[in-house]
Amino acid sequence: MVSGGGTNLQALLDGVADGRIADARIGLVLSSRAGAYALERARLAGVKTIVVSKEDYPDEEEKADAILAALADAKTGLVVTAGYMSLLSRRVCSAYKGRMINIHPSLLPKYGGEGFYGSRVHRAVLAAGEKETGATVHYVDDVGIDSGEIIMQKRVPVMENDTPETLQKRVLEEAEHLIIVEATNAIVKKLAENL
Protein backbone atom coordinates (compact mmCIF):
# COMPACT_ATOMS: atom_id res chain seq x y z
CA MET A 1 0.00 0.00 0.00
CA VAL A 2 1.47 3.30 -1.14
CA SER A 3 0.75 7.01 -1.52
CA GLY A 4 3.85 8.63 -3.01
CA GLY A 5 7.03 8.04 -4.94
CA GLY A 6 7.39 4.42 -3.99
CA THR A 7 11.09 4.07 -3.20
CA ASN A 8 10.28 1.49 -0.51
CA LEU A 9 8.03 -0.28 -3.01
CA GLN A 10 10.98 -0.32 -5.42
CA ALA A 11 13.14 -1.88 -2.69
CA LEU A 12 10.46 -4.57 -2.25
CA LEU A 13 10.14 -5.16 -6.01
CA ASP A 14 13.93 -5.49 -6.26
CA GLY A 15 14.01 -7.75 -3.20
CA VAL A 16 11.49 -10.15 -4.74
CA ALA A 17 13.26 -10.04 -8.11
CA ASP A 18 16.72 -10.82 -6.71
CA GLY A 19 15.58 -13.40 -4.15
CA ARG A 20 16.18 -11.46 -0.94
CA ILE A 21 12.45 -11.90 -0.36
CA ALA A 22 12.07 -15.60 -1.05
CA ASP A 23 8.91 -17.48 -1.96
CA ALA A 24 6.81 -14.36 -2.39
CA ARG A 25 5.38 -12.16 -5.07
CA ILE A 26 3.80 -8.73 -5.04
CA GLY A 27 0.28 -9.32 -6.29
CA LEU A 28 -1.20 -5.85 -5.90
CA VAL A 29 -0.13 -2.28 -5.28
CA LEU A 30 -2.95 -0.26 -3.73
CA SER A 31 -2.55 3.51 -3.64
CA SER A 32 -4.47 6.21 -1.79
CA ARG A 33 -3.63 8.67 -4.61
CA ALA A 34 -4.12 8.34 -8.36
CA GLY A 35 -1.01 10.41 -9.14
CA ALA A 36 1.43 8.44 -6.98
CA TYR A 37 4.61 7.56 -8.90
CA ALA A 38 4.61 4.25 -7.02
CA LEU A 39 1.81 3.16 -9.38
CA GLU A 40 4.15 3.63 -12.34
CA ARG A 41 6.84 1.58 -10.56
CA ALA A 42 4.31 -1.21 -10.09
CA ARG A 43 3.14 -1.05 -13.72
CA LEU A 44 6.75 -1.22 -14.96
CA ALA A 45 7.20 -4.36 -12.84
CA GLY A 46 4.00 -5.91 -14.21
CA VAL A 47 2.15 -5.68 -10.90
CA LYS A 48 -1.59 -5.01 -10.80
CA THR A 49 -2.55 -1.60 -9.35
CA ILE A 50 -5.67 -0.08 -7.86
CA VAL A 51 -6.48 3.33 -6.38
CA VAL A 52 -8.76 3.67 -3.36
CA SER A 53 -8.83 7.39 -2.62
CA LYS A 54 -10.76 9.67 -0.27
CA GLU A 55 -12.12 11.42 -3.35
CA ASP A 56 -13.65 8.22 -4.69
CA TYR A 57 -14.64 6.91 -1.25
CA PRO A 58 -15.45 9.85 1.07
CA ASP A 59 -17.32 7.48 3.41
CA GLU A 60 -14.74 5.65 5.59
CA GLU A 61 -16.78 2.44 5.76
CA GLU A 62 -17.11 2.29 1.97
CA LYS A 63 -13.39 2.98 1.65
CA ALA A 64 -12.65 0.12 4.08
CA ASP A 65 -14.97 -2.16 2.07
CA ALA A 66 -13.13 -1.27 -1.14
CA ILE A 67 -9.70 -1.89 0.43
CA LEU A 68 -10.77 -5.22 1.93
CA ALA A 69 -12.34 -6.33 -1.37
CA ALA A 70 -9.19 -5.43 -3.34
CA LEU A 71 -6.94 -7.27 -0.87
CA ALA A 72 -9.21 -10.33 -0.85
CA ASP A 73 -9.41 -10.35 -4.65
CA ALA A 74 -5.59 -10.36 -4.79
CA LYS A 75 -5.50 -13.26 -2.27
CA THR A 76 -3.29 -11.13 -0.04
CA GLY A 77 -1.28 -12.98 2.58
CA LEU A 78 0.78 -10.03 3.84
CA VAL A 79 0.10 -6.31 3.57
CA VAL A 80 3.07 -3.93 3.58
CA THR A 81 2.25 -0.27 4.04
CA ALA A 82 5.23 1.47 2.48
CA GLY A 83 4.67 5.20 2.48
CA TYR A 84 0.89 4.81 2.73
CA MET A 85 -0.24 8.22 3.98
CA SER A 86 -3.90 7.52 4.68
CA LEU A 87 -5.33 6.24 7.95
CA LEU A 88 -6.65 2.70 7.79
CA SER A 89 -9.89 1.77 9.50
CA ARG A 90 -9.79 -0.54 12.49
CA ARG A 91 -11.71 -3.07 10.39
CA VAL A 92 -8.90 -3.26 7.82
CA CYS A 93 -6.23 -3.47 10.54
CA SER A 94 -8.15 -6.20 12.39
CA ALA A 95 -8.71 -8.22 9.23
CA TYR A 96 -4.94 -8.41 8.66
CA LYS A 97 -3.79 -8.58 12.29
CA GLY A 98 -0.34 -10.18 12.35
CA ARG A 99 -0.22 -9.94 8.54
CA MET A 100 0.18 -6.17 8.07
CA ILE A 101 3.45 -4.32 8.56
CA ASN A 102 4.53 -0.70 8.21
CA ILE A 103 7.81 1.13 7.71
CA HIS A 104 8.25 4.32 9.74
CA PRO A 105 11.18 6.79 9.41
CA SER A 106 12.17 6.97 13.08
CA LEU A 107 13.24 4.75 15.95
CA LEU A 108 9.79 4.14 17.40
CA PRO A 109 8.37 4.88 19.87
CA LYS A 110 10.18 8.19 19.31
CA TYR A 111 8.63 10.48 16.69
CA GLY A 112 5.69 8.24 15.91
CA GLY A 113 1.94 8.59 16.07
CA GLU A 114 -0.39 11.30 14.88
CA GLY A 115 1.30 14.11 12.98
CA PHE A 116 4.63 12.29 12.58
CA TYR A 117 5.03 11.37 8.94
CA GLY A 118 7.34 12.22 6.05
CA SER A 119 9.65 15.19 6.53
CA ARG A 120 7.83 16.16 9.75
CA VAL A 121 9.61 13.28 11.47
CA HIS A 122 13.03 14.47 10.32
CA ARG A 123 12.33 18.10 11.27
CA ALA A 124 11.35 16.94 14.77
CA VAL A 125 14.50 14.79 15.10
CA LEU A 126 16.69 17.76 14.13
CA ALA A 127 14.78 20.20 16.36
CA ALA A 128 15.33 17.89 19.33
CA GLY A 129 19.07 17.71 18.71
CA GLU A 130 19.11 13.92 18.37
CA LYS A 131 22.47 12.32 17.56
CA GLU A 132 20.89 9.32 15.85
CA THR A 133 17.64 8.33 14.21
CA GLY A 134 16.68 5.52 11.91
CA ALA A 135 13.75 3.47 10.73
CA THR A 136 11.37 0.92 12.21
CA VAL A 137 9.32 -1.88 10.73
CA HIS A 138 6.39 -2.73 12.97
CA TYR A 139 3.12 -4.59 12.89
CA VAL A 140 0.05 -2.47 12.19
CA ASP A 141 -2.52 -2.84 14.93
CA ASP A 142 -6.04 -1.52 15.47
CA VAL A 143 -5.05 0.40 18.62
CA GLY A 144 -3.28 3.49 17.31
CA ILE A 145 -0.91 5.05 14.81
CA ASP A 146 2.58 3.48 14.84
CA SER A 147 1.64 1.57 18.01
CA GLY A 148 2.12 -2.02 16.84
CA GLU A 149 4.83 -4.41 17.98
CA ILE A 150 8.29 -3.51 16.65
CA ILE A 151 9.77 -6.11 14.31
CA MET A 152 13.07 -4.49 13.33
CA GLN A 153 14.96 -1.21 13.60
CA LYS A 154 18.09 0.22 12.01
CA ARG A 155 19.96 3.22 13.35
CA VAL A 156 21.39 6.05 11.27
CA PRO A 157 23.61 8.91 12.54
CA VAL A 158 22.38 12.49 12.47
CA MET A 159 25.08 14.73 11.03
CA GLU A 160 25.80 18.23 12.30
CA ASN A 161 24.92 19.91 9.00
CA ASP A 162 21.82 17.79 8.23
CA THR A 163 18.66 19.31 6.85
CA PRO A 164 15.32 17.48 6.90
CA GLU A 165 15.97 16.57 3.25
CA THR A 166 19.48 15.18 3.74
CA LEU A 167 18.40 13.26 6.82
CA GLN A 168 15.36 11.84 5.04
CA LYS A 169 17.56 10.66 2.15
CA ARG A 170 20.04 8.98 4.53
CA VAL A 171 17.29 7.25 6.52
CA LEU A 172 15.69 5.98 3.30
CA GLU A 173 18.92 4.70 1.75
CA GLU A 174 20.72 3.40 4.85
CA ALA A 175 17.78 2.08 6.86
CA GLU A 176 14.31 1.95 5.30
CA HIS A 177 15.21 0.31 1.99
CA LEU A 178 17.22 -2.37 3.81
CA ILE A 179 14.96 -3.31 6.70
CA ILE A 180 11.71 -3.26 4.70
CA VAL A 181 13.17 -6.07 2.58
CA GLU A 182 14.71 -7.95 5.50
CA ALA A 183 11.58 -7.72 7.65
CA THR A 184 9.26 -8.66 4.78
CA ASN A 185 11.34 -11.74 4.04
CA ALA A 186 11.28 -12.74 7.73
CA ILE A 187 7.50 -12.29 8.00
CA VAL A 188 6.88 -14.21 4.75
CA LYS A 189 8.95 -17.11 6.15
CA LYS A 190 7.10 -16.94 9.47
CA LEU A 191 3.68 -16.94 7.78
CA ALA A 192 4.71 -19.85 5.53
CA GLU A 193 5.75 -21.90 8.58
CA ASN A 194 2.32 -21.36 10.14
CA LEU A 195 0.37 -22.59 7.09
Image (cartoon, rainbow, N blue to C red):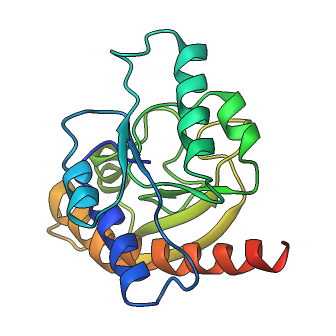
Percent position of residue 113, x then y: 55, 39
Percent position of residue 72, x then y: 63, 43
Hey, which residue is sitting farthest top in the picture? 59
Hey, which residue is sitting farthest bottom in the picture? 19
| Rendered image quadrant of residue 159 | bottom left
Percent position of residue 166, x then y: 16, 65
Percent position of residue 73, x then y: 58, 43
Question: For this view, does 106 lie left or right of residue 125?
Answer: right
Asked if 114 appears above or below 123 in the picture, the reply is above
| Rendered image quadrant of residue 69 | top right
Query: Which of 133/3 is in front?
Result: 3
Asked if 61 appears above or below 121 in the picture, the reply is above
| Rendered image quadrant of residue 190 | bottom right
Query: Which of 110/72 is in front?
Result: 72
Query: Which of 87/166 is in front?
Result: 87
Can residue 12 be spotted in the picture?
Answer: yes
> Which residue is located at x 44 percent, y 48 percent?
1
> Which residue is located at x 39 percent, y 63 percent?
130
Asked if 30 appears above or below 48 in the picture, the reply is above
Question: For this view, does 123 lie left or right of residue 165?
Answer: right
> Which residue is located at x 45 percent, y 59 percent?
106
